[in-house]
Image (cartoon, grey):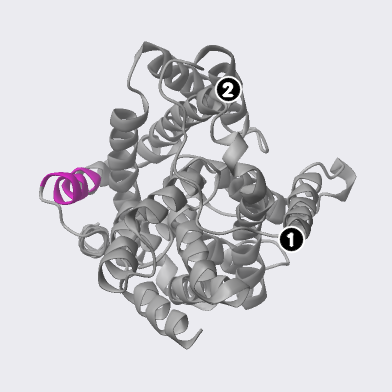
């Protein structure tokens, strides 16, 4: 347990670069250096986590902790990998909230420019994510059509709170109906551990309760409940990588819990953090306009965004050997992944690019740094914030 704590805390402090980079860090640390598991077992865990909603790198890290030190190891692995970024994002949110409530900086050009620069960095990161996901997930006419259809639908329903999940659900349905048998199944080697059925049943109940929470009657939806509904929905439906939380969490802007400027500034800031992108939830929980904010809001939001996908993992572990060979499951996954490309593309169009204004120049410079020159994200975020502050100070 102490070994898991030490190693995952170091990874939580140093794992920059996003989910794919995190998997590279895990492979180098746990397969090559320490031989906690072999290549085949590591590939099986990655395959299992990749086909389910949720933050893939966090799920993989948690399961490696489970393999090494049991249930306590799984919790410690998640906590240590997540806490550094979550604490930093909470601090940023509290500082921003304090300045906007009591400070005089919010009326200055350079401070507003700094926030706009963070938003421009977010635009660059999302652009890279859309193009990268499109190349890897939309490989034929069928998946490209699903992606474009999802983008059209997402633009049509933009501004309607609570419907961010619809393009993903329809994409999965179309994939299950028409894409099965188009490619080899999503089969992989058997997983290197077993979960008791009682644990799986308990996890299934937790996941069902999370889904039931999303169906709360309208008269129960207070601002705090709306915040948690949006965060739980994002944690339940994120296919295709951490960047997909952006459109799913955008309902917080539609609900009036966040200004678009602060929302995208926070999303830009999380790109400079190590660890999972899901710690954006800590920022949202701390700085939102509902009664559930501050440190408590950050803690609740961080737990809420991880719990659904983690519960689903433990619920499906005993059945994975059967599920992984179902052709309809492979088709549904392809359809869902294609739809998230369109969903993310719609958010790139509106509200990100449509609201940039003169900051489009900073966004283009940030994209050149990250996509052409391969600068690390934290450098791109810092440069974008600096350029924004300078531009704001110059009026």
Question: Is 90 in front, or is 187?
Answer: 187
- As drawn, 204 above or below 90: above
The residue segment tinted magenta is 363-372
Residue 202 image point, x, y percent: 78, 58
**151 relative to 282 in the view: left or right:** left
Local packing at callout 1 (Cα closer than 10 Å; few below 14, some 14-19, many 20+) is some
Q: Is 269 left, or right, of 314 in this rendering?
A: left
Q: What distance separates the C-alpha of mark 1 from that of mark 2? A: 27 Å
Going from N to C along the chain, the mark reached first, 1 or 2, is 1
The residue at 29%/33% (across/down) is 131
Q: Which residue does the image show at 75% across and 45% down from the upper left?
A: 211
Secondary structure beneath dot 1 equals helix
* Res 256 seen here: no
The percent coordinates of residue 80 (x first, y second) are 48, 77
Which corner quadrant holds the C terminus?
bottom left
Name the residue at the left extreme. 373
Residue for point 28% across, 45% down: 124
- What residue is disc 2 on? 328
- Label 2 residue SS: helix
Tell me which corner region of the image, top left, top right, bottom left or bottom right, holds residue 81: bottom left
Q: Position of residue 223 (x, y in %)?
A: 74, 55
What residue did someone put label 1 on?
199
């Amino acid at each position: 347990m102490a070994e898991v704590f030490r190693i995952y805390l170091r990874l939580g402090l140093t794992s920059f670069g996003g989910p794919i980079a995190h998997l590279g860090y895990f492979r180098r640390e746990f397969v090559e250096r320490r031989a906690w598991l072999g290549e085949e077992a590591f590939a099986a865990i990655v395959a299992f986590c990749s086909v389910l909603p949720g933050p893939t790198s966090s799920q993989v890290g948690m399961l490696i902790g489970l393999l090494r030190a049991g249930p306590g190891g799984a919790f410690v692995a998640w906590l240590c990998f997540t806490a550094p970024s979550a604490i930093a994002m909470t601090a940023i949110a509290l500082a921003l909230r304090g300045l906007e409530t009591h400070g005089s900086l919010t009326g200055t050009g350079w401070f507003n420019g700094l926030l706009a620069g963070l938003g421009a960095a977010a635009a660059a990161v999302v652009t890279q994510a859309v193009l990268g996901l499109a190349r890897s997930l939309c490989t034929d006419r069928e998946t490209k059509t699903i992606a474009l259809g999802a983008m059209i639908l997402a633009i049509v329903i933009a501004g309607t709170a609570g419907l961010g999940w619809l393009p993903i659900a329809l994409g999965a349905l179309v994939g299950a109906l028409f894409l099965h048998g188009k490619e080899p199944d999503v089969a992989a080697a058997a997983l290197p551990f077993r979960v008791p059925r009682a644990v799986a049943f308990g996890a299934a109940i937790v996941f069902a309760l999370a889904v039931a929470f999303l169906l709360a009657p309208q008269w129960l939806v207070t601002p705090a409940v709306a915040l948690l509904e949006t965060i739980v929905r994002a944690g339940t439906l994120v296919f295709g990588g951490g960047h997909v939380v952006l459109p799913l969490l955008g309902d917080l802007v539609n609900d009036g819990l966040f200004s678009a400027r602060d929302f995208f500034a926070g999303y830009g800031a999380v790109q400079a953090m190590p660890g999972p992108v899901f710690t954006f939830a800590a920022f949202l929980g701390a700085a939102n306009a509902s009664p559930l904010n501050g440190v408590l809001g950050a803690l609740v939001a961080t737990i809420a965004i991880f719990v659904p996908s983690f519960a689903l993992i433990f619920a499906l572990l005993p059945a994975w050997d059967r599920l992984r060979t179902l052709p309809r499951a492979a088709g549904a996954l392809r359809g869902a992944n294609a739809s998230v490309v369109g969903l993310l593309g719609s958010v790139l169009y509106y509200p990100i690019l449509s609201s940039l204004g003169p900051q489009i120049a900073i966004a283009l410079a940030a994209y050149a740094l990250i996509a052409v020159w391969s600068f690390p994200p934290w450098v791109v975020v810092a440069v974008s914030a600096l350029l924004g502050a300078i531009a704001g100070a110059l009026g």
